[in-house]
Amino acid sequence: MKLRHALFGLMACAAVLPVAATAQTVMRLAENQPDSNPVTVAMYRFADLVKEYTNGEIEVQVFSGAQLGQEPETIEQAQAGIIDFTRVNSVGLANVSPSMGAFTLPYVFAGWDHKYKVLDGDIGAEVLADLEDVGLKGFAYMDAGARSFYTVEGTTIESIDDLKGLKIRVQPAPISIRMMELLGAVPTPMNYGEVYSSLQTGVIDGAENDFVSYHTSAHYEVAPNYVVDAHLSPPALILMNKARFDSLSPELQEAVTKAAVEASLYEREIMREANEQARDTVIEGGSTVTEIDNGPFQEAVQPIYEEFPDLMPLLERIQAAK
């Protein structure tokens, strides 16, 4: 309830040009994950809710499987108004709105309860508000699981020393790149759609993601060694072109926001369950899943917090919320 109030408060403060949508206005939403991924399932739920809450005045068409591009491209498209919505991870979004980077720092959240206390509170609302400065409207936060390492056949990670020299795919973002350097690996930024073939052909030795994406992307087929260190737990979120949002009547703004919040909360539930199921599925499919002491990993990345001084005020508030 606090999250909804915060979002509605931000919405009310926005400069609104009350232009009502015409009957069956069609809006496009870009999603880079396949239909089987919980985030995509939630996007279809979002589309259904928008249609319901606007009494059919707005229809959201979901383009899944990166039909409209990978996340860096769809963020730009949403900013430019080429598309109306996109669902993205906060890691790539931090390249556009730097305060989002606070949620992408390694080991920043102590656990599920701490994470959503931060995201659903004042800190999360302030970071969402910053998106408006770059032409975007953010809604509620979704769960993107906890990211851990996985490597190709013949390459295993049993300790932090095993990371040294390994070419690990990371999302193209400064924090992710620096984190990998501090861990001793060779960060290899690339778009998500290139990862499978890069693992298969030996361009990279490994990657990192949550169990759901590891499964739905079929990366487990070419990188069967998964090591649970949970170094990142960045949220995902639905974005909308701000000018497009502002052009809606207040009633339609409220309807879209309500749909986004409900779809995001729904996604959290199904993502949590899906990660547990995906873990079992990849093990049945031949993957080896190893629990590891991440204490040395946490110690190795400590310098990163001081290397991004602009994020320190937010980081201190996040830590104080534990």
Image: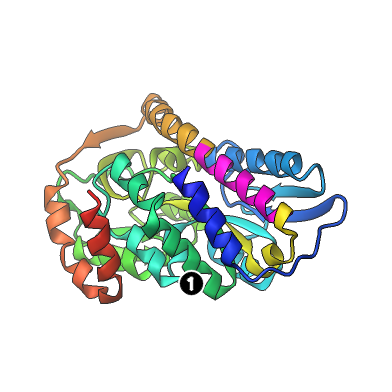
Residue type indicated by callout 1 = Val
Q: Nearer the viewer, residue 312 or 306?
A: 312
In-image side of 104 versus 156 (left or right): right
Q: Secondary structure at mark 1?
A: loop
Which residue is found at the position 49% from the left and 61% from the top?
191
- Residue 115 shown left or right of residue 27 in the figure: left
Residue 73 position (above or below residue 294): below
Q: Residue at x 74, y 66 (%)?
A: 247
Q: Position of residue 211 (x, y in %)?
A: 39, 38
Q: Residue 24 appears at what percent x and percent y?
A: 85, 50
Query: What range is drawn magenta here?
Result: 252-265
Query: In the image as oriented, which residue stretches furthest toward the right?
Result: 23
In the visual, does 7 lie left or right of 68?
A: left
Quadrant in which residue 73 is drawn: bottom right
- For image coordinates 44% across by 38% down, the residue present is 212
Read off the residue under disc 1: 96
Q: Residues within 10 Å of mark 1 (few under 14, many from 20)?
A: some
Is 280 placed above or below 155 here? above
The total of numbered circles placed on residues is 1
Q: Is residue 313 visible?
A: yes
Q: Main secondary structure of the magenta part?
A: helix
